[in-house]
Amino acid sequence: MSTDIATRRSVAEVYDHVWENRSTIQSRDAYAMMLLALARENPLLACLTTDMNFQDHFARELPRQFVDLGIAEQNMITVAAGMTVAARPVFANGMSPFAIARAYEQIKVDVAGANLPVKIVGTHGGLASGHYGPTHHSLEDIGATRLLPNMTVVVPGDAWEAVQATVAVADDPGPTFLRLGRSATPTLYDERTEFVLGKARVLREPGRVLFIATGPYPNLVAAEAAAELAATGITAGHLNMHTVKPLDREAILDAIAHAEVVVTIEDHRAVGGLGGAVCEVVAEVGGPPVRRIGIPDVHYDLVGGERYLLDNAGINVPNAIAKALDVVAR
Amino acid sequence: MLTQAPPQQNVAGRLAVEIRRLVIEMSGSPNGVHIGGSMSIADLLAVLYGEVLRQPSGAGSPLDRDYLILSKGQACAALYAALAATGVLPKSEIETYAEQGSRLAGHPMKTLPGVDFSTGSLGHGLSLGLGVALAGRRYGHDNRAFVILGDGELQEGSNWEAAMAAAHLGVDNLTAIVDRNGLQISGRTEDCMALEPLTGKWASFGWRVLAIDGHDHDQIRQALGGPVEPGRPTAVIARTIKARGVPGLQDTKKSHSATLDRDAQRLALAALESEL
């Protein structure tokens, strides 16, 4: 994988390579390839990191644009803000549980409040750290960043969407949180469609049930649950809400016009994240009932891999179907 | 107490007096002013704005200029005074300090001309300065970043992340200025959370350390206006007196934030006059 990062040269070639390997490549490696390609084209692009090893090729090839700040997320975030006097955009990389939660006040004051082109990229989002345990899980990052003014919050659904989002985020003038996972996940896409920040992707046309999901596994759950419901004669739509902020309000309003129930799915706390954001929109217009699937409000210290932990938190197809049927009579 | 020649004779001397006068003016605000920490950095700001900083207000090139970051943002009254005294802000605006709708908040915001970064939450400024200086070095711009830190502020751990990184990266166009007035809200820094040996701490992190009298313009001039040491950031430990020159408040913890009534303002101005 690391050789791939070094040998992919242009942005167009990275797109092609990741598209061809979108179900086997890790989104963070896809992101790293694209970032390096973008940085070759834009000498003002800076890449900061906190002792991460997936960007070694960036460090070797473009050392002037690269800074490793060690295991010190608070400092990295604010250094990134300071560097915007001459560099932009500045990508600030870390593991999400530390880059967001530990450095939250720095993000609030120096990045979001200051509205600077700092792109915080957090790997190990959600439960991606698996057996490493709750210190390494990042279940509050979407909600925490969503609360901050000026922030754009993006959760790509697969490696392909990760490279598309990387380009979009680099072009956007404001501060961003780009949340990535850890392992390679099956792709959501069978054709190369355009990615637009803040515009949800309709993965299945609206029906009596509306699934809204963000992130790789939640979208896979939504896709499968919608297909199973359809097979039983209950139409079900599916929106991939890759941008949680700004939320695509229009897409939600369009889709709930047909829906009897909305089910949100995320690998994040069930409060404050995607589900909370959707509830705010739907409640304000007096829309259909909403059921949220996410991590319950308990200290989640079960030991296991990501899929096991997701399943135990109810982020699975049977639960998604059950939540829908809770409202929609067969 | 000024150890140099009569202050009216040079730019920094005149600025120091004007900064103090304007801080005393703002101290009449019923909202209170962090007068102690503002007065302790008045001479540092006077030399910086009068003689050292190139284009501190950001006019001209955004890159080949110097940056002053007031990490101890609570001392904004001194910063506002320096900006007003150097023509970046209209002097009349000083009267609006902390009033409804004013641009002059109790901590400086970057929406104000002459303020590059909003500060107030302690422990951010050194990282900001590191970012500015590092970007200057990496992208070939001739800039310097000066960061004024409170001594109590150094209890925030993020400072030491930045200190470690600045030395490791050899960012020599970064200067940290520690306003070593020895007091914080609850009293003496050494009673609350001891900082000494302070010069030893910075030196052990790999910084060049200069210990000076923070009210002596010649010493400030030499420390801040002199050449940088290639490959090493500089820490200037400026020994200062909190609320320096303000009768009844000098070197007291109650000077941290205070409102001066008319009589106290008159006394403070008279004390300032007597130094001339």
Image (cartoon, rainbow, N blue to C red):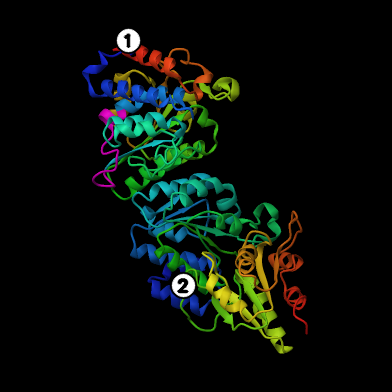
Provide the secondary structure element on which disc 1 rests: helix
Q: Does dot 2 land on a helix, a strand or a loop?
A: loop
- The amino acid on which the numbered mark 1 sits, given as a three-letter code, is Ser
> Residue B265 in magenta?
no
CB-based contact (under 8 Å), mark 2 and mark 1 = no
Q: Position of residue B178 (x, y in %)?
A: 43, 27
Q: Residue B51 lies in magenta, yes or no?
A: yes
- Which SS does the magenta portion mostly show? loop
Q: Nearer the viewer, mark 2 or mark 1?
A: 1
Q: What residue is at 61 percent from the left and 71 percent from the top?
A: A216
**Which chain contains the residue that carries disc 1?**
B
Q: Which residues are magenta?
A: B48-64
Q: Position of residue A208 (x, y in %)?
A: 68, 82
Give the letter of the chain under mark 2. Answer: A
Residue B149 vs A115, above or below: the answer is above
A249 or B129: nearer the viewer: A249
Where residue A71 appears, as percent x and y from the top left, is 54, 47
The answer to whether residue A45 is above or below residue B122 is below
Q: Residue at x 59, y 64 (%)?
A: A181
Q: Which residue is mark 2?
A: A196
Residue B97 on image: x %, y %: 41, 33
As drawn, B61 above or below A253: above
Q: Is residue B196 visible?
A: no
Residue at left offset 44%, top offset 78%: A16
Residue A220, by quadrant, is bottom right
B157 lies left or right of B218? right
Q: Amino acid at mark 2?
A: Val
Figure quadrant of the C terminus of chain A? bottom right
Q: Which residue is mark 1?
A: B274
Give the quarter of the image for residue A14.
bottom left
Q: In this rendering, do the residues under marks 2 and 1 share a single chain?
A: no
Disc 2 crowd, CA 10 A, few/some/many (<14, 14-19, 20+): some
